[in-house]
């Protein structure tokens, strides 16, 4: 499964940070001021500084007044702070003497914004506020990233950037790479001994989806009464980063449908739960079905194509898709 899967998941919770020259994260935020004007913000960030956690961010604000659409830009410093309660605090502070550039619109008078929000470690719930130099009260924000798919974010680029701008191309490349990484398959192999004394092996092919979920195809191979049996079923899976930097992978069947690939024995679909450390090394895991559970061992595979032939024929559709 590897930690890159969870890193891909974290991109959905962008941590944004004077002017971004490259795209490392993006954020989308909405807020409404006291007069009822609705604002949409897009932040583009560069990488964090290892010394103080600061990163460069470019902030664009899109809004309409009197039927006219306005687009403004300013630069911010963004600071990342790990709180004692385990939560993460993100602060977008406009750079000193920051000026607002009018990208689109006229008769625009806009003050730079400060955005501060907090990510709860256990629930990933995000709450925050917007303010400017004239604010007497803090305005709640709506953090939109958690409701956007990658294609939605690609569509947002055209709202905030013109095609002739260099950042437009950087954003397109950033999101297109993310789609490629998302569609890239990942492979896991685990084994266990059932309560019947039979040795089972599972080969799991997973594709990372949004919000930390995986679509996986599981094939189980085992020998019973001198015959090799292979079954297949689909699963929905989750990956989660724990406070101790371990990663847990939970794999559960989508339904009760089992496809016999080889042999004709009855089989109950398995669920798997296992943990990897910060270096992607297997720590422990469990297999369970309707009747029993067992400890898992992790099978290190040096050649995925060769190992897959234990479970698939070369003419199999899945083999053709992922291994040819």
Image (tube, rainbow, N blue to C red):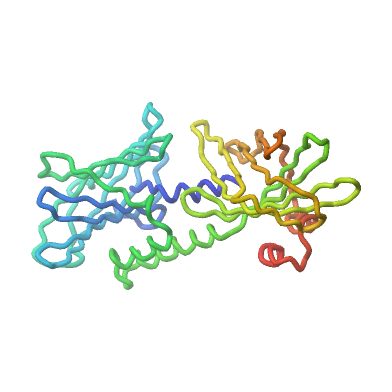
At horizontal 38% and vertical 26% (from top left) the residue drawn is 84
Residue 219 on image: x %, y %? 72, 52
Residue 104 on image: x %, y %? 19, 67
Label tally = 0
Where 63 falls versus 197 (above or below)? below
Tell me: 156 left or right of 6: left
Which residue, as the protein is rendered here, is positioned at the far right?
226
Residue 123 picture quarter: top left
For residue 205, say whether it is visible: no
The quarter of the rendered structure image containing the C terminus is bottom right
Which residue, as the protein is rendered here, is positioned at the far bottom?
164
Residue 80 on image: x %, y %? 36, 39
Which residue, as the protein is rendered here, is positioned at the far top?
84
Residue 122 on image: x %, y %? 43, 34
Q: Between 125 and 84, which is closer to the camera in this rendering?
A: 125
Tell me: 313 left or right of 24: right
For residue 91, say whether it is visible: yes
Where 324 falls versus 124 (above or below)? below
Tell me: 68 left or right of 312: left
At horizontal 35% and vertical 48% (from top left) the residue drawn is 16
């Amino acid at each position: 499964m590897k930690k890159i899967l969870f890193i891909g998941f974290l991109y959905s919770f962008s941590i944004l940070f004077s002017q971004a020259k490259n795209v490392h994260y993006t954020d989308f935020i909405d807020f409404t001021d006291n007069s009822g004007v609705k604002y949409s913000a897009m932040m583009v960030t560069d990488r964090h500084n290892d010394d103080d956690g600061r990163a460069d961010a470019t902030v664009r604000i899109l809004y309409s007044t009197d039927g006219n659409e306005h687009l403004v830009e300013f630069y911010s410093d963004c600071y990342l702070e790990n709180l004692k309660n385990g939560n993460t605090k993100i602060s977008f502070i406009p750079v000193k003497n920051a000026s607002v550039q009018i990208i689109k619109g006229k008769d625009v008078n806009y003050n730079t914004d400060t955005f501060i929000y907090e990510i709860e470690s256990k629930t990933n719930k995000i709450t925050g506020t917007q303010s400017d130099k004239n604010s007497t009260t803090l305005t709640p924000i709506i953090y939109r990233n958690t409701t956007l798919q990658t294609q939605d974010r690609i569509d947002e680029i055209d709202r905030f950037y013109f095609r002739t701008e260099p950042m437009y191309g950087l954003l397109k490349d950033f999101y297109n790479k993310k789609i490629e990484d998302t569609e890239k398959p990942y492979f896991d192999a685990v084994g266990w001994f059932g309560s019947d004394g039979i040795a089972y092996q599972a080969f799991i092919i997973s594709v990372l989806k949004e919000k930390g979920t995986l679509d996986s195809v599981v094939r189980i191979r085992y020998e019973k009464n001198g015959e090799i049996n292979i079954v297949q079923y689909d699963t929905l899976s989750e990956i989660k980063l724990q406070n101790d930097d371990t990663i847990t992978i939970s794999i559960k069947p989508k339904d009760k449908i089992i496809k016999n690939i080889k042999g004709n024995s009855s089989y109950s679909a398995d669920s798997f739960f296992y943990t990897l450390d910060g270096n992607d090394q297997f720590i422990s895991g469990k297999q369970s079905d309707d009747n029993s559970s067992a400890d898992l061992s992790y099978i290190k595979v040096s050649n995925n194509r060769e190992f897959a032939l234990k479970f698939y024929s070369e003419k199999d559709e899945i083999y053709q898709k992922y291994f040819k």
